[in-house]
């Protein structure tokens, strides 16, 4: 781990040195940040560090820490470690000292004085932070020329980052398997979520995002946010979108299951199995040099095929795609960059200069439009949903006659399907980290 971390820091130094040189700076100060207070309260919100800082020091316990990155120099960490009997004082991980020069300060004012002196001696310096801090003496604040360049390169992960992402995926998969067992035993969304947390080894605050634990028709809400305390009268389906974090890096995994039984449960199970094969075809199509927008359109073609195969929509698959009918069943993007953030930054960047490549107008929710490169990590998460609002719009459209409404209405109680894997792009395809973690856990 130490060797991987040292090499990781070397890669970051190269990226930041290039970005600073291009923008005309000698150094950057990267602030970890601090949590905000809840309104009219003395309790703080859950703290997440500035991702630009977290990439250098991968731990959340770093409130009000700063990193000074000087071109061609060892990065210097200014770390607050005040004595405190209210909270356990933070400590930087011991292994970080192999790559960072670490100064700890019990006095916050002494830290700021030392940092300001270092900035003054560093030449032209840019501050990268959530909030400006003129007292530090930096020449500029969040210069986009620097940030665009480093955010563009952040899509390509280092071996250290890949190790963290793989371990996060293993923890997420352990949670998914426990949640599946809780679902099949008839438990509530609330109880299923507790099973997930215990198996993945997380508190709710440590998760990369709030778990989506959706029974039955709740799966038709893409970001369903509640946890019913009581189980429904009948279990039809279960969609779980839940991840994990290791060293700040996120896994993002979704699975859908049907309850045991005949009738619509059996049909929905068959639909899930068919859609799982389609999702794997999409994953197998990931190649360096392909546009992610092209992969997204391939997902809509697979949705068209599933709709026709299960007699939900009638007609030719190409016509169904061309008419935009699939967008009523798949309103979100195929996937997104994954890393320090669940929806990692830089998905619409066309190059290091910050030139944007927005999604096509018919796919406004597409978070990734870049050409796929080796080292990218992103999700592949097609879905097929029975969303009342979108179905009502489709029923009122000129294409309503293409839909077998009796079949569609029968599936409404199941909500929908999403199957999401995390993949690492390789030189000639991709490595499906999620499927590997399920196989490692003995669940293919």
Image (cartoon, rainbow, N blue to C red):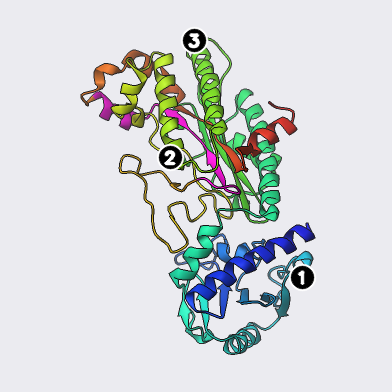
The residue under label 3 is: 263
Tag 2 near tag 3, CB within 8 Å: no
Mark 2 burial class by Cα count in 10 Å: few <14, some 14-19, many 20+: many
Q: Residue 407: x and y, percent?
A: 37, 14
Q: Going 55% across and 65% down the picture, which residue do you hit?
A: 43
SS at mark 3 in the image: loop
Where 153 sits versus 316, above or below? below
Is 74 in front, or is 200? 74
Q: Going 58% across and 64% down the picture, which residue do you hit?
A: 49
The stretch of residues the image draws in magenta is: 372-395
Is tag 2's residue or tag 1's residue first in the polypeptide sequence? 1
Q: Residue 267: x and y, percent?
A: 49, 13
Location of residue 71 by image quarter: bottom right
Q: Residue 385: x and y, percent?
A: 42, 28
- Could you tell me which quadrant the N terminus lies in? bottom right
Q: Is 389 a magenta residue?
A: yes
């Amino acid at each position: 781990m130490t060797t991987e971390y040292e090499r990781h820091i070397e890669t970051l130094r190269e990226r930041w040195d290039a970005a600073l040189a291009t923008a005309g700076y000698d150094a950057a100060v990267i602030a970890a940040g601090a949590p905000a207070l809840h309104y009219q309260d003395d309790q703080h919100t859950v703290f997440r560090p500035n991702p630009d800082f977290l990439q250098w020091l991968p731990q959340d316990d770093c409130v009000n820490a700063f990193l000074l990155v000087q071109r061609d120099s060892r990065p210097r960490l200014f770390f607050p470690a005040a004595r405190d009997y209210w909270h356990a004082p933070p400590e930087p991980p011991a292994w970080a000292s192999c790559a960072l020069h670490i100064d700890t300060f019990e006095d916050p004012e002494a830290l700021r004085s030392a940092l300001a002196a270092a900035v003054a001696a560093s030449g032209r310096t840019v501050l990268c932070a959530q909030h400006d801090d003129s007292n530090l003496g930096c020449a500029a604040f969040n210069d986009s020329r620097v940030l665009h360049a480093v955010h563009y390169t952040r899509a390509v992960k280092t071996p250290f980052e890949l190790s963290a992402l793989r371990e996060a995926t293993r923890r997420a998969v352990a949670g998914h398997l426990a949640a599946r067992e809780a679902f099949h035993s008839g438990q509530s969304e609330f109880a299923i979520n507790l099973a997930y947390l215990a198996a993945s080894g997380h508190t709710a605050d440590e998760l990369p995002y709030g778990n989506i634990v959706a029974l039955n028709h709740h799966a038709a809400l893409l970001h369903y946010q509640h946890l019913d305390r009581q189980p429904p009268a009948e279990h039809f389906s279960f969609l779980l979108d839940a991840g994990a974090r290791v060293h700040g890096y996120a896994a993002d995994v979704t699975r859908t299951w049907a309850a045991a039984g005949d009738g619509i449960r059996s049909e929905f199970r068959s639909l899930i199995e068919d859609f799982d094969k389609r999702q794997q075809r999409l994953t197998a199509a990931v190649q360096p040099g392909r546009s992610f927008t092209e992969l997204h359109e391939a997902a809509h073609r697979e949705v068209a095929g599933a709709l026709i195969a299960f007699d939900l929509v009638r007609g030719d698959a190409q016509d169904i795609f061309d008419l935009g009918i699939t967008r009523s069943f798949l309103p979100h993007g195929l996937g997104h960059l994954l890393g320090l953030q669940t929806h990692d930054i830089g998905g619409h960047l066309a190059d290091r200069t910050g030139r944007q490549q927005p999604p096509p107008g018919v796919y406004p929710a597409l978070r990734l439009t870049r050409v796929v490169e080796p080292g990218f990590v992103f999700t592949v998460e097609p879905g097929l949903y029975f969303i009342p609002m979108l179905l009502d719009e489709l029923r009122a459209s000129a294409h309503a006659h293409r839909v077998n409404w009796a079949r569609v209405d029968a599936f409404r109680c199941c909500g929908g399907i999403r199957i999401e894997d995390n993949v690492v792009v390789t030189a000639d395809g991709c490595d499906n980290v999620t499927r590997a973690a399920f196989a490692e856990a003995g669940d293919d």
